[in-house]
Amino acid sequence: MPLEAVKVGLALFGTVAGALGACSVPFLFTRWPYVATTNKALCDLREILKPLAKPTASFLDIGSGDGSVVELAAMTGFGSSLGIESNPVLAFYSKWRLRKLRNATCLWGRYQNMNFSGIDTVYVYGGEQIMTALGEKLTAELKPGATIVCNSFPLPKPENHIGKRCLFFIRRAGSLYIYRVQN
């Protein structure tokens, strides 16, 4: 085999290996793959958020991915729309995507380190594995009357009491499950 063919083969192999490595970098920072909210779910969510959106209301998207849900909440009329994303690449992209909206931003971090006491509406598209612990945290920290919208994965046993508060299932809209925190 001529030396030039070997050099070309090695260069091609290095390019492909480098590209595959670069594509996998976002998944090195988190256990969860990025799955975008579908257009149908975004349309259903818009209808759910319309009556909840007020200039004084706050919205949080846990695992905000590309920021599309945070953008939707901001454009629907929430005074403050925040996303939290554990993947730094997606968090940076979301922050860049939301840069022109004064009432929206994204943070790089973990929801476990946040306090939810000032949030009026929470959206989460999380896997089954996190829903029990997340439900307990949301019920304990959200103020009474706060709304939780879960995409595809419901909160298990939502009527369980956590301290003086409990979480009640309201209804389902497509793939979205809607809950309210009660005293």
Image: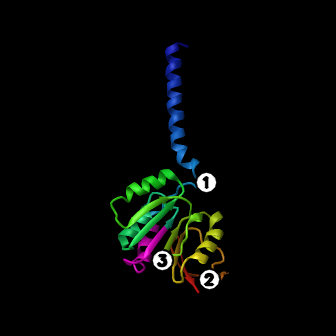
In the image, 14 versus 146, the foreground residue is: 146
Badge number at residue 166: 2
- Residue 120 is labelled as 3
Q: Secondary structure at mark 2?
A: strand
Q: Is residue 26 visible?
A: yes
Residues in magenta, as a range: 39-60
Q: Amino acid at mark 1?
A: Arg
- Answer with mark 3 or mark 2, whichever residue precedes in sequence: 3
Q: Of the two numbered discs 1 and 3 on the same chain, state the one appearing first in sequence.
A: 1
Residue 87: image location, x then y, percent: 53, 53
Question: Is 41 one of the magenta-colored residues?
Answer: yes
Q: In the displayed image of the protein, which residue is found farthest to the bottom?
A: 183
Give the residue furthest to the top: 2
Q: Which residue is mark 1?
A: 31
Q: Residue 161 location in percent, x, y?
A: 66, 82
Mark 3 and mark 2: Cα distance apart in space: 16 Å
Q: Is residue 48 magenta?
A: yes
Q: Is residue 161 left or right of residue 35?
A: right
**Mark 3: secondary structure:** loop
Image quadrant of residue 24? top right
Residue 155 seen in render: no
Mark 2 belongs to which amino acid?
A: Cys
Could you tell me if the residues under marks 2 and 1 are in contact, i.e. CB atoms within 8 Å?
Answer: no
Q: Quadrant of the N terminus?
A: top right
Q: Neighbour class for label 2 at 10 Å: few (<14), some, many (≥20)? A: some
Label 1, secondary structure: give it.
loop
x and y percentages locating residue 119 in the rendered image: 49, 74
In the rendered image of this protein, does residue 114 appear above or below residue 28? below
